[in-house]
Structures are given as structure tokens and as C-alpha cells.
Image (spheres, helix red, strand yellow):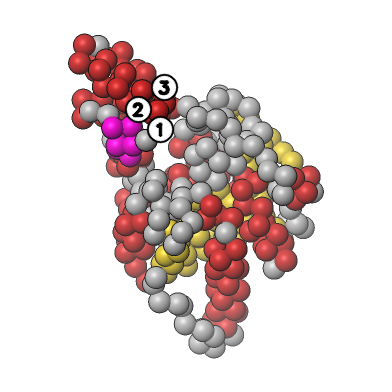
């Protein structure tokens, strides 16, 4: 833990003894707002400059959407917390080469979007809105908190009474299992006392989702897996992820049963995994294999190749 985090931990834990509400409010503000905006990298700019750019009003700001290709066989790419759509640039290039039409975005408080922050419901609404504009998506690729929001959109749809999102295939990379995990992991990384965890949960319930009966169940991926969801799900996680325990993706794969295959990488951590050539190739092969299997089934033939064993 660096000096700044140590100072924050000490201050919050100390304040929690004499002013728990004040300390809880400070922890909530830290939890609520991204630490900084991910900037566009030089190697991402050429692809981003080729995109058709749009806007989506959501929450307290406007998301920025990016679209490539002809519109045929659209694929949605969903980023996570403190990230941005351009991080999928290597995958966008691969998908374009396969004849697909990638769509991604920057959520409020992220990338080039306006606003200061987003909630999981904002992320859900962006997914549903892009589905209404450019879907139905042949595949959705989601990372981190984007996985949680994607399952929510598959079950609930979005604002404006948008229906549940439908997709044939899903790729879940380094998925966050539920909202409660985010709170617990945040407190664990900062070394906060159990009392501050309880204060933070209370703030989340009252200020982010007032009137909700049980957000912790609603925003839990295992509880939001739709029975009529994607027929094929590729679950990818890195063994050295220090932000989200790889066991979370193993549990997701188990919950999905025969629909899922699990791939475990190593040495990539939580963020580098989405741009890694090995992972990009894995997603590309998933697209090719599943499309060939679908064509074969339509023609009455068996699947051309078995799924790889879980990693």
C-alpha cells in the first residue's frame, strides 16, 4: 500500500471512532468517484478517429458512443470502472477483420464522456440504449463491473421501458460478481474497519438507490443470470488479478453450467487482460467456432469442434 492510501486508511479509521457518520461520508465519496479519467493512448487514436461518434444522456452526464463497420453483425464492448471504450482497440480491429461491427462507449465520468461518475444502473441503461439503437447484438464483451451491468441489462432492460437486452454470445472478462463484492473489496484494499464497511453500505443504499428493497440481491450476477440468456458464454480471468478474485469467474462459470467455458490466463492482472493478444485471439476463436457451430446446427450437422477444456 502506498503512502497516500496509508494516510487515507489511518484518517478514516481514526475518524470512525469519534465521528462514524463523517467517516462514512468520506469513504462514500471515495468509493463513488473514479480516481481519475483514463486517457486515450496514442496507439488507440487512429482507430478511435475512424469511429462514428454519438451521445447518450444518462445519469448526471452524457456517455460517448463509438461505432465501426457497416452495422452488420453488431458487437457491444462494455468497459468497467476507471476505464474507457478505447481499451478494446485491439479487439475492435480483430472484430472488424471478421466482418463484425463493434460498438463501445465511454460512460459518464470516464474517458471523453461528461459528468463525474456513474452507477451500475447508468451502465445498464447505456447498454440497453445502445441495444435499441444498434442491436440486437450478436455478442457482448464486458470487463469487470461491465459484466455485472451486462447481466442486469439482460434481465431488466433499461430506462425508457427498454426491454431486456438479447444476445447470442457473451464474453465475461474479469467479472465482478456483485455490488457487495465491490464494497467489501474497497474496504479491504484500504484496510477499513467493519464499522466503516457498514456505514458505506448504508450510504450506498440511501443515496445511490433510495427505496430499493435489496440492492445486494438485485446486483448479484449469480442471481441475475437469465434462463433465456446467451446460449454460449466465454468466461476469462487472470490468475494474477489482484482486484477481483479469479474464484469469482469460476463461480460464474459454474452458475452458467453447460453454457460456459472458462479460460484462465496468467501474468496479465485486472486491466491489461482486455488488450492482451492472447485474450483477443481467444475471443476471435470463440466467434469463429460458435458461428461455425450455429451454421452447422442449422444445416443439421454436429458441431465442427469441441469446446476447449476449462482452464
In the rendered structure, which disc, 1 or 3, sits on the residue that comes first in sequence? 1
Magenta region: 183-191
Residue linked to disc 2: 6
User: Which is more toward the observer, 93 or 294?
Assistant: 93
User: Which is more toward the observer, 227 or 311?
Assistant: 311
Q: Residue 150's x, y, as percent?
A: 48, 49
Q: Residue 7's x, y, as percent?
A: 36, 23
User: Which is more toward the observer, 209 or 5?
Assistant: 5
The label nearer to you, 1 versus 3, is 1
Distance Cα–Cα, label 1 vs label 2:
6 Å
Q: Is residue 294 left or right of residue 27?
A: right
Distance Cα–Cα, label 1 vs label 3:
20 Å
Q: Residue 223's x, y, as percent?
A: 32, 50
Under circle 2, the secondary element is: helix
Residue 155 seen in the current view: no
Mark 1 and mark 2 residues within 8 Å of each other at the beta carbon:
yes
Under circle 3, the secondary element is: helix
Distance Cα–Cα, label 3 vs label 2:
17 Å
Residue linked to disc 1: 2
Amino acid at each position: 500500500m502506498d503512502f497516500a492510501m496509508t494516510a487515507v486508511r489511518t484518517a478514516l479509521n481514526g475518524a470512525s471512532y469519534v465521528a462514524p457518520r463523517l467517516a462514512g461520508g468520506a469513504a462514500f465519496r471515495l468509493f463513488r468517484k473514479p480516481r481519475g479519467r483514463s486517457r486515450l493512448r496514442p496507439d488507440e487514436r487512429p482507430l478511435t478517429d475512424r469511429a462514428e461518434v454519438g451521445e447518450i444522456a444518462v445519469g448526471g452526464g452524457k456517455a460517448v458512443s463509438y461505432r465501426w463497420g457497416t452495422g452488420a453483425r453488431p458487437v457491444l464492448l462494455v468497459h468497467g470502472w476507471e476505464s474507457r471504450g478505447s481499451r478494446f482497440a485491439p479487439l475492435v480491429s480483430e472484430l472488424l477483420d471478421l466482418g463484425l461491427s463493434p460498438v463501445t462507449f465511454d460512460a459518464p465520468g470516464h474517458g471523453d464522456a461528461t459528468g463525474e461518475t456513474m452507477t451500475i444502473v447508468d451502465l445498464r441503461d447505456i447498454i440497453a440504449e445502445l441495444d435499441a439503437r444498434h442491436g440486437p447484438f450478436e455478442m457482448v464483451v464486458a470487463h469487470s463491473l461491465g459484466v455485472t451491468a451486462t447481466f442486469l441489462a439482460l434481465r431488466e432492460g433499461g430506462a425508457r421501458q427498454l426491454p431486456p437486452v438479447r444476445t447470442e454470445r457473451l464474453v465475461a472478462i474479469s467479472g465482478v460478481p456483485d455490488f457487495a463484492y465491490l464494497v467489501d473489496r474497497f474496504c479491504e484494499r484500504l484496510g477499513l474497519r467493519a464499522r466503516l464497511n457498514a456505514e458505506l453500505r448504508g450510504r450506498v443504499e440511501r443515496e445511490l438507490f433510495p427505496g430499493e428493497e435489496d440492492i445486494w440481491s438485485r446486483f448479484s450476477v449469480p442471481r441475475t443470470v437469465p434462463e433465456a440468456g446467451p446460449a454460449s458464454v466465454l468466461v476469462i480471468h487472470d490468475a494474477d488479478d489482484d482486484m477481483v478474485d479469479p474464484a469469482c469467474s469460476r463461480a460464474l462459470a459454474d452458475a452458467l453450467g453447460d453454457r460456459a467455458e472458462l479460460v484462465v490466463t496468467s501474468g496479465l492482472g485486472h486491466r491489461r487482460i482486455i488488450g492482451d493478444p492472447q485474450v483477443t485471439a481467444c475471443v476471435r476463436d470463440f466467434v469463429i467456432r460458435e458461428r461455425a457451430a450455429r451454421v452447422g446446427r442449422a444445416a443439421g450437422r454436429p458441431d465442427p469442434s469441441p469446446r476447449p477444456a476449462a482452464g
